[in-house]
Image (cartoon, grey):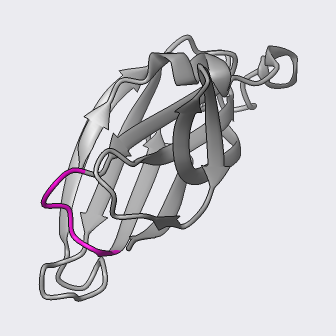
């Protein structure tokens, strides 16, 4: 998998800031809505299609998007990706886990991350757990086929 910086998608998938302008009572970001799916750009417009199946086609872009409620200008993200093992075992049972951490700026209350299919990616079951500021987390499970 390779990470992509699709900044134009953050604007295209942004939601109304009026519904998500306040932080929850303990100051931690709150996940309002989270989805996993495919990202495409056609005719200059970005589109998101929720799904749990990613086609094993080179350059297919996929990832997650979250609507969050927070008053913080920046959110620390911890992302744990568990890959299937080459032996075909399910993720979490013999798979390999990579952890990345970074800080993101919500755009109109939306954060996201994308990857694209590259040569060498394997078919199988993947698990991505995203944790915000050591608080709420969301787990996405999907299959690359």
Which part of the image, by quadrant, shows the C terminus? bottom left
Query: Does residue 133 appear in this view?
Result: no
Dividing the picture into quadrants, the one containing residue 116 is top left
Outermost residue toward the right in this view: 18
In magenta stretch: residue 58: no
The residue under the point 29% across, 52% down is 117
Q: What stretch is highlighted in magenta?
A: 118-124
Near-viewer residue (62 or 132): 62
In magenta stretch: residue 119: yes
Q: Is residue 130 above or below residue 68?
A: below
Outermost residue toward the top in this view: 73
Near-viewer residue (23 or 42): 42
Dividing the picture into quadrants, the one containing residue 43 is top right
Query: Does residue 2 appear in this view?
Result: yes
On the image, the x and y values in percent for residue 45 come to: 64, 24
On the image, the x and y values in percent for residue 105 come to: 50, 16
Apparent side of residue 32 relative to residue 4 in the rendered image (left or right): right
Dividing the picture into quadrants, the one containing residue 3 is top left
């Amino acid at each position: 998998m390779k990470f992509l910086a699709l900044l134009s998608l953050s604007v295209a998938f942004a939601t109304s800031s009026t519904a998500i302008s306040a932080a929850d009572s303990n100051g931690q970001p709150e996940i309002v809505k989270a989805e996993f799916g495919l990202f495409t750009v056609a005719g200059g417009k970005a589109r998101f299609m929720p799904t749990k199946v990613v086609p094993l086609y080179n350059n297919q872009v996929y990832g997650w998007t979250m609507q969050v409620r927070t008053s913080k200008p920046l959110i620390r993200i911890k992302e744990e990706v568990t890959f299937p093992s080459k032996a075909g075992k399910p993720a979490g049972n013999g798979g390999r886990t990579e952890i990345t951490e970074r800080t993101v700026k919500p755009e109109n209350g939306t954060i996201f991350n994308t990857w694209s299919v590259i040569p060498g990616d394997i078919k199988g079951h993947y698990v991505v757990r995203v944790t915000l500021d050591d608080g709420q987390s969301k787990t996405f499970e999907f299959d690359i086929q």
